[in-house]
Image (cartoon, grey):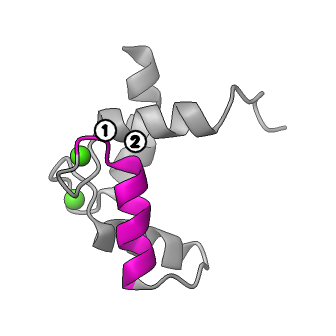
Amino acid sequence: MSETSDYQATFDMIDVDHDGLITADELKNLMVALGADVSDEMAVLAVQVIDTDGDGRVSLPELAEYLSTNSPQQPQQP
Ligand SMILES: [Ca+2]
Ligand SMILES: [Ca+2]
């Protein structure tokens, strides 16, 4: 369970209204905040990639699974 909680901080950062689900809007806001030029369509597609149960929103387990699949164990940044 500690693995999921490792992603809790990341999830909370994206889930700005703290309803426990990340919407395309929230994902877009994050990427725009990071300096990416993201359209609504791109945000929706990104959610669809992460959203494994197809409800159109990203839950913490879905985000954790996505991040653990796509970012192999990385050493702490110096
Ligand atoms: Ca939310
Ligand atoms: Ca989902």
In the image, taking residue 60 as reference, residue 6 lies left or right, namely: right
Report ligand 1 position as a quadrant. bottom left
| Residue at image coords 60%, 39% | 70
Visible in this render: residue 65?
yes
Looking at the rendered image, the quarter that the C terminus falls into is: top right
Q: Which residue lies furthest to the top in this view?
A: 1
Question: On the rendered image, what quadrant is the N terminus found in?
Answer: top left
Q: Which amino acid does label 1 sit on?
A: Leu
Q: In this view, does 21 lie above or below 62?
A: below
Residue displayed at 47% across by 28% down? 6
Decide if ligand 2 comes within 8 Å of the CB at mark 2. Answer: no
- Type of residue at label 2? Leu
> Do residues under tags 1 and 2 come within 8 Å of each other at their CB atoms?
yes
Q: Is residue 7 visible?
A: no
Percent position of residue 2, x then y? 42, 16
Assign a secondary structure to mark 2.
helix
Q: Which quadrant would residue 36 be assigned to in this image? A: bottom right
In the image, residue 51 lies in the stretch drawn in magenta: yes
Q: Residues within 10 Å of mark 1 (few under 14, many from 20)?
A: some
The numbered dot on residue 60 is 1
51 and 21: which one is in front?
A: 51
Q: Which residue is drawn at 22% across and 58% down?
A: 56
Q: Where is residue 34 in the image (x, y as percent from the top left)?
A: 58, 72
Part of the protein shown in magenta: 40-53
> Is 16 on the left-hand or right-hand side of 35?
left
At 56% from the left edge and 32% from the top edge, which residue is drawn?
69
- The part of the image, by quadrant, that contains residue 47 is bottom left
Number of on-image labels: 2
Q: Which residue carries the number 2 mark?
A: 63
Image location of residue 61, percent across then percent down:
32, 32
